[in-house]
Amino acid sequence: MTADVMAVQLLKRWTELDTQRSTWESLWQDIADYCVPRKADITRKRSAGDNRAERLFDATAVHSAELLAASLHGMLTNAATSWFSLRYRDPFLDELDEAKEWLQETEEVLYTALARSNFQEQIHELYSDLVTFGTGVMMIEEDDKDDLRFSTRHIAECYLSENDKGRVDTVYRKFKLSARAATDKFGEDKVSQKILKLSESNPYELVTLLHVVRPREERDITKSDSQNLPFMSCYLDPEAKQVLSVGGFNENPYLCPRFLKSSYEQNYGRSPSSSSISDIKMINKMSEVSIRSAQKQVDPPLMVPDDGFMLPIRTVPSGLNFYRSGTRDRIEPLNTGANNPIGIQMEEQRRQAIRQAFYVDQLILGAGPNMTATEVVQRTEEKMRLLGPVLGRLQAELLQPLIERCFAVLSRKKSFPEPPEVLGESTIEIEYVSPLAKAQRTGDVQSLTRLFELVTPLAQIDQGVLDYMDTDGMVKHLIKTVGVPAVAVRSKEQVDALRSERQQQAAEQQQIMEAQQTATSAGEAAPMVKALGGPDGINQLLATEEGQ
């Protein structure tokens, strides 16, 4: 396929995606205006630094969205705690020290690369897009210095398309770049004549470009060069219909999670903001009206007679108003009869509905003064389990492809230690150990705790009931459920060695005790032997008893 034909074909597909996305843009603009004003550039474009909160009279939705985004960040990808771990699909490898040590070192390399990169700042922006627009877009690229580089893209730039499995695998991104930067990036022989002339006459003027990432339809799987990688990367000049560069990726570099997604809708998701946009608009309108009502009461309109006063009327402190002597006309305030408490009550109802839509009640635990520590823990876990459906989608569309992409990039850079030969072609799986993921599994821990509470009094009556309990299996299950680090747990070989040593010590102790008992018995028998005349006397006595 020639470059011109490729450009025309890709631009035609972009036009189709643009048409499909146009139905979402008005909703996104409303959400941005009322929930995240700093990103309110969807259908209305504003200058940098412009005031974008002119339609905002109540910030409940803004604060709730920020709280939910920060909470997801802290509960799913907290930099201070481990939020994922690696394990083998083959349980036999989990019992081998060599295999477990390599897997642990691999985890440390992954965490170190994430900490060294800009992951934490960019993932928070992604959560902000998820809870507001319902769809987040993040790109993971290789970096020569920090190994990994993350960039969260504004939804206004991106046009998405799903595959047959419902996963986003095609991303068109429209962005602006200065003419000078475009020329430096792609080369003077690749850019159009317009961009080349702008780079000389006005190098800082912005030009619109298009970046396309999609599965490559035609490639030679026996080659691994950039033109035959599984995913195509193509930069276009849409105005000139010209291809600027063509490359590729081994994996899809884009992560496109959706907070919620209707089964009959494609490509884009919905969010708590879209679910409560009517309440958000209403509370802003009600707040605007309440502010005007309060203004009328604090600084009411005045009733002034049409004659008898010397204009203008002065309403400033210490202002003097003159009227003709002898008249009984006065300046009086207009009583509007406003009832502010009713308005405040209705506003609070809307605010509470918005907070519930953003899970504020689940994220902030109202602990009473008489609550025990156990009750606080249980209530916290119950509230966090309510976010289970959200966690499932985020694990499938965000966390798993994120870790797989980072693992693949670091593996190609040979950042991991050399794997032991025992691994062979074994498969590595991802296990999530974030606070939110642990909360989903705490039911098993509570069940085991309850089992011990019930069995303990029965064991005092009959020790046989303990035969039903496999303590080794319980401990292994608790270690896996709670997410105890591998460094804090002994391997099966170490446990077997400790038990063997303990049994050997017990056997030696038993032999010592038997020897002591034998010596004690021999010491007690010595006086009797002496009284019978020694061994000869004992033999004579035994012979006499046999004769009888």
Image: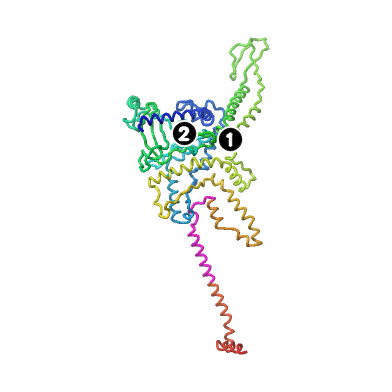
Q: Which amino acid type is shown beneath numbered disc 2?
A: Leu
**Label total for image:** 2
Q: Is residue 418 visible?
A: yes
In magenta, the rendered stretch is 481-510
Find residue 396 and report its horizontal and vertical position in percent: 50, 42
Tag of residue 150: none
Give the SS element for disc 1.
helix
Tell me if residue 109 comes above or below residue 269 in the rendering: below
> For mark 2, does the 10 Å Cα neighbourhood hold few (<14), some (14 to 19), or many (20 or more) residues?
many
Q: Nearer the viewer, mark 1 or mark 2?
A: 2
Q: Which residue is mark 2?
A: 160
Residue at 38% x, 45% y: name it: 412
Q: Nearer the viewer, residue 64 or 29?
A: 29
Find residue 109 and report its horizontal and vertical position in percent: 42, 47
Residue at 46% x, 44% y: name it: 403
Instruction: Confirm whether the magenta stretch covers residue 503.
Output: yes
Q: Which residue is mark 1?
A: 357
Q: Along the horizontal axis of the image, is 15 left or right of 507?
A: left
Residue at 61% x, 55% y: name it: 452
